[in-house]
Amino acid sequence: MHCNIYRSSKKEEMYVYVVADQHDNQVVEEKDPLDVLPEAMRKAFGRATFVMHLALTEERKLARANVLHVLDSLQTKGFFIQMPPEGLINPNAVEPEGLRGA
């Protein structure tokens, strides 16, 4: 299965995988890649920036997602949302001195 991967403008390390035509290795500018997402999810995702075109198989390894979950979601929903890894940002961290009040 072929998909295009887009990065979120609103959340670091959040990506959406969208089913792509097998012969389409280029981004189609006229079409919004997020059309397959529910409205609330599109708003939370923000603007989509193309990252890459990828051919997925059951044997392919992905860095942060189980390829079988991705394939299942692409087949049933037409998209897969990859959330940021947990623990990436510490919400209790103290702001550096130079950034307070900025």
Image (cartoon, rainbow, N blue to C red):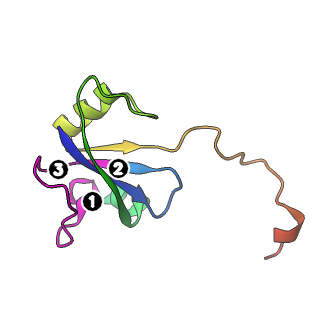
Please tell me how crowded label 1 is: few (under 14), some (14-19), or many (20+) other residues with Cα within 10 Å: many
Numbered mark located on residue 16 in the image? 2
Dot 1 and dot 2 residues touching (CB under 8 Å): yes
Q: Is 91 left, or right, of 43 in this rendering?
A: right
Q: From the viewer's perspective, is 25 left or right of 16? A: left
Q: Nearer the viewer, mark 2 or mark 3?
A: 3
58 over 76 or under it: above or below: above
User: Dot 2: what SS?
Assistant: strand
Quadrant, the N terminus: top left
Name the residue rendered at 24%, 60% in the picture.
33
Q: Earlier in the sequence, mark 3 or mark 1?
A: 3
In magenta stretch: residue 28: yes
Q: Name the residue type under label 3.
A: Ala
Q: Residue at x 85, y 61 (%)?
A: 96
Q: Is residue 80 above or below residue 58?
A: below
Q: Amino acid at mark 2?
A: Val
Left or right of 72? Residue 98 is: right
Which mark, residue 34?
Answer: 1
Residue 36 drawn in magenta? yes
Relative vertical location of residue 69 with respect to residue 85 in this rendering, above or below: above
Residue 29 image point, x, y percent: 21, 71
> Label 3, on which residue?
20
Quadrant housing residue 65: top left
Magenta stretch: dominant SS? loop
Quadrant of image for the C terminus: bottom right
The residue at the point 25 percent across, 24 percent down is 58
Part of the protein shown in magenta: 16-38
Q: Residue 91 placed where, x, y %?
A: 71, 48
Q: CA distance from mark 3 to mark 1?
A: 12 Å
What separation in Å lies between label 2 and label 3 (alpha carbons)? 12 Å
